[in-house]
Image (cartoon, rainbow, N blue to C red):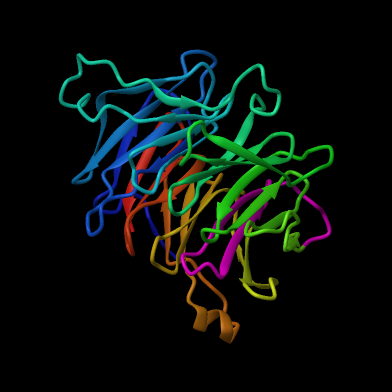
């Protein structure tokens, strides 16, 4: 594994607070990703800050600070990058005023719609995860009570359907992820991952747990761009498991285990349009593995091609752009972006 303390092109920004969640805005076709959002973890005064990444430089976008009454535990830009969804105490959709960067004296546009209402017990549930449908017309939101809300955003008012996805003493839906327009994965505190075909069935088409004698909360899942491989890691786990999941018969097979020499997995992200998988660790290392199918079929061990030492415990990570794009990682008091 190649380990570099500060490879060329790395940009870091100190924010003065720990980053709870982060995401890139999808770039226009053929263009590099330049905008990202980060959420704070504070006792009071929480917000989402929009940032600009350009030529190895990270800067705050003037005027683009979205205030929140509680931390946003997850956030994601829509596929068109026109909307930003944040979730935690409530699900909110934002359309930041594009003129705010040029005119900082103008206030940021308020939320387009706030989808959680205190008078509705289902809508008022705290959320733990969210993901945009690939076409951008719907949102899947994982709740702390084990349910998944499917928000259809095309109509007015917005409509929600509900899946009873997970149960037990700890049923929080830690991750949701779309395999394609009709197939959704949920990962829960009960240790199960469940795959849902939304074209008609109300029951999961596949249920699986990671190998191991001890059942742990399933914290991290990420689909490969080809939709066949799933990377997954449990809470406080030092290994990433790769599962081959094929449509039709909906069968899953365990194909590889990627091990961290120290620390636990704190974030997973596949490179869009590539076979590279990044894992952030509590040991301060960001590891990147090339996961080529010929290597998996041959049964050869997968070794990380890159190990970036951020100098402190890492949180989540996200990969932008197509192919060898940029990776952003959360660290103490700020973030770091590095080219892959």
Relative depth, front residue between 259 and 89: 89
Q: Residue at 44% across / 69% down in the picture?
A: 275
- Percent across and percent down for residue 77 are 40, 41
**Quadrant in the rendering for residue 61:** top left
Drawn side of residue 313 relative to residue 48, left or right: right
Furthest toward the bottom, the residue is 298
Q: Is residue 230 magenta-colored?
A: yes
- Percent across and percent down for residue 174 are 64, 42
Q: Is residue 241 magenta-colored?
A: no
Furthest toward the left, the residue is 102
In the image, the segment drawn in magenta is: 212-238
Relative depth, front residue between 247 and 201: 201
**Quadrant in the rendering for residue 189:** top right
Q: Is residue 139 visible?
A: yes
Q: Residue at 65% across / 41% down in the picture?
A: 161
- Percent across and percent down for residue 255 are 64, 74
Above or below, 188 against 248 in this view is above
Q: Quadrant of the C terminus?
A: bottom left
Drawn side of residue 185 relative to residue 332, left or right: right
Above or below, 123 against 272 in this view is above
Q: Residue at 59% across / 63% down in the picture?
A: 230
Drawn side of residue 232 relative to residue 276, left or right: right
Q: Residue at 22% across / 45% down in the picture?
A: 56
Number of numbered callouts drawn: 0
Q: Is residue 238 visible?
A: no
Q: Quadrant of the N terminus?
A: bottom left
Relative depth, front residue between 267 and 71: 71
């Amino acid at each position: 594994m190649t380990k570099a303390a500060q490879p060329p092109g790395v940009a870091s920004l100190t924010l003065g607070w720990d980053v709870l969640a982060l995401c890139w805005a999808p770039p226009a076709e053929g263009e590099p990703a330049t905008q990202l959002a980060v959420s704070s973890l504070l006792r009071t005064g929480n917000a989402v800050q929009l940032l600009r990444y350009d030529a190895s430089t990270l800067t705050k976008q003037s005027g683009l600070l979205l205030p929140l009454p509680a931390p946003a535990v997850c956030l994601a830009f829509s596929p068109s990058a026109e909307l930003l969804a944040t979730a935690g105490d409530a699900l909110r959709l934002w359309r930041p005023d594009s003129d705010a960067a040029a005119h900082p004296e103008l206030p940021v546009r308020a939320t387009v719609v706030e989808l959680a209402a205190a008078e509705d017990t289902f809508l008022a549930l705290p959320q733990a995860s969210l993901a945009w449908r690939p076409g951008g017309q719907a949102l899947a939101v994982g709740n702390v009570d084990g349910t998944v809300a499917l928000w259809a955003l095309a109509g007015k008012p917005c409509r929600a359907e509900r899946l009873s996805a997970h149960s037990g003493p700890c049923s929080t839906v830690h991750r949701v992820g779309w395999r394609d327009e009709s197939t959704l994965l949920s990962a829960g505190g009960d240790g199960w991952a469940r795959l849902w075909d939304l074209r008609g069935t109300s029951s999961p088409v596949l249920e699986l747990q990671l190998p191991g004698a001890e059942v742990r909360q399933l914290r991290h899942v990420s689909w490969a761009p080809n939709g066949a491989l799933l990377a997954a890691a449990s809470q406080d786990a030092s290994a990433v498991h790769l599962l081959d999941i094929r449509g039709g018969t909906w069968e899953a097979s365990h194909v590889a285990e990627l091990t961290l020499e120290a620390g636990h997995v704190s974030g997973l992200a596949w490179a869009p349009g590539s076979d590279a998988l990044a894992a952030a660790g509590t040991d301060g290392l960001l590891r990147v593995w090339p996961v080529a199918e010929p290597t998996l079929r041959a049964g050869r061990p997968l070794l990380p091609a890159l190990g970036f030492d951020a100098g402190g415990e890492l949180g989540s990570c996200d990969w932008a752009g197509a192919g060898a794009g940029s990776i952003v990682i959360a660290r103490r008091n700020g973030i770091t972006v590095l080219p892959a």
